[in-house]
Image: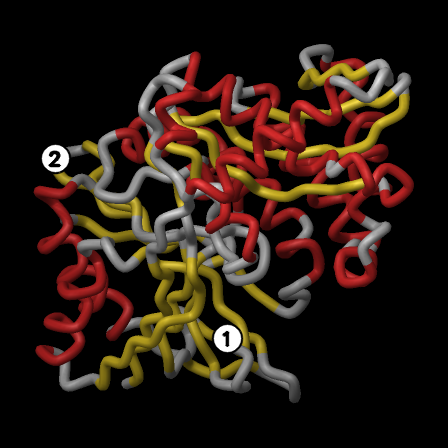
Amino acid sequence: MDFTLQRNFTELDPLAAEWNALLAESSMHVPFLRYEYLRTWWETRGGGEWPDSELAVVLARQDGRLAGVAPLFAARNREGAPALLLLGSIEISDYLDLIVRPQDLPAFLSGLLDFLGHCGPAGLSVPAAEAGSKPWQVLDWQNLLESSPTLPLLKVEAEKHGWAFTQEQTYHAPSIPLKGDFETYLSGIDKKQRHEIRRKMRRAEESGLDLRWYWVTDETTLAAEMEAFMAMMAEEPDKANFLSEAMRRQMQLSSRAAFENGWLQLAFLEVDGQKAAGYLNFDYLNRIWVYNSGIARRFLELSPGWVLLGYLLQWANENKRDEFDFMRGDEDYKYRFGGVDKLVLRAKVSR
């Protein structure tokens, strides 16, 4: 394999279709590795998470064919070490990984570590808090699913290079396997929770209020709908702090990229014409990826978040989606709806 280092997205833009085609055949195919998503993520440096960073995407070709992408950037990690991190790290991209076909992963990872090992200060440096730059010391790869084949191979290759490998659990990520029928799904969860979901949906429907749920299909309204969604998010103090100006811009850019490429599901529940709850999801690879949510507190007594979630699960079952992935976070409601845990890990290689 022939490895090259790319330091700006202008040079990568012509490869967008080839990048996404490779992702479709890759070991870990997730929406956060789509070219259009990572392009917008880099534009805002993750909504302001990594202001002092430099792009360091490594491409591998074999016989002229794109065989692997290591979507990396160089920055000081949270411990202050000069590091190479996965694009998308850490806060707003739930699952990350390398982009490579399963059969090519061993050769790609071996060659990648050789390539990175020979990139000295002149070839691949990390922005430093003080003047100048530093050679990278750590591969700090976060948001890897426990099922990722990258993890065991990275350990093996790190040890071959005489480098230290560690991994740790960082997040829970519940998801619901779907059965193709809403009643079948409900019958498979805890009886008490099944009754609670039905009761809340029925109470809202019988309230005498005008209920309507929908998702955004008109691109001309998307920006305004996203502003309304973020306004509901901001009613929760933690999310209000999260929604900096840079993060708001990031969410607008990433939602538009997902819409333009056909995988955005921005859904709302309205009560008497007013937004009561919203879910920002991705409808991708025949599954629903639940990205964020917002609730108007004045409607809390109607449990609008549960009601809208019930409608979305009903739709997902009826439309034969395979899975409803709540992604990172161990909030109680995810398990009440039948979420089954998987783990998200952090892998570090120190040289």
The residue depicted at 29 percent of the width and 76 percent of the height is 167
Q: CA distance from mark 1 to mark 2?
A: 31 Å
The answer to which of 59 and 38 lies nearer the viewer is 38
Closer to viewer: mark 1 or mark 2:
1
Q: Is 255 above or below relative to 39?
A: above
The residue depicted at 76 percent of the width and 22 percent of the height is 222
The quarter of the rendered structure image containing the C terminus is bottom left
The residue depicted at 42 percent of the width and 50 percent of the height is 174
Residue that mark 2 sits on: 63
The residue depicted at 13 percent of the width and 71 percent of the height is 157
* Mark 1 burial class by Cα count in 10 Å: few <14, some 14-19, many 20+: many
Q: At numbered mark 1, what does the secondary structure look like: helix, strand or loop? A: strand
In the image, what residue type sits under mark 2? Asp
Horizontally, residue 58 falls left or right of residue 82, namely left
Residue that mark 1 sits on: 126
The answer to which of 182 and 270 lies nearer the viewer is 182
In the image, what residue type sits under mark 1? Val
Q: Position of residue 1 (x, y in %)?
A: 14, 48
Q: Position of residue 160 (x, y in %)?
A: 9, 78
**What kind of colouring is applied to the model shown?**
secondary structure
Q: At numbered mark 2, what does the secondary structure look like: helix, strand or loop? A: loop
The answer to which of 245 and 194 lies nearer the viewer is 194
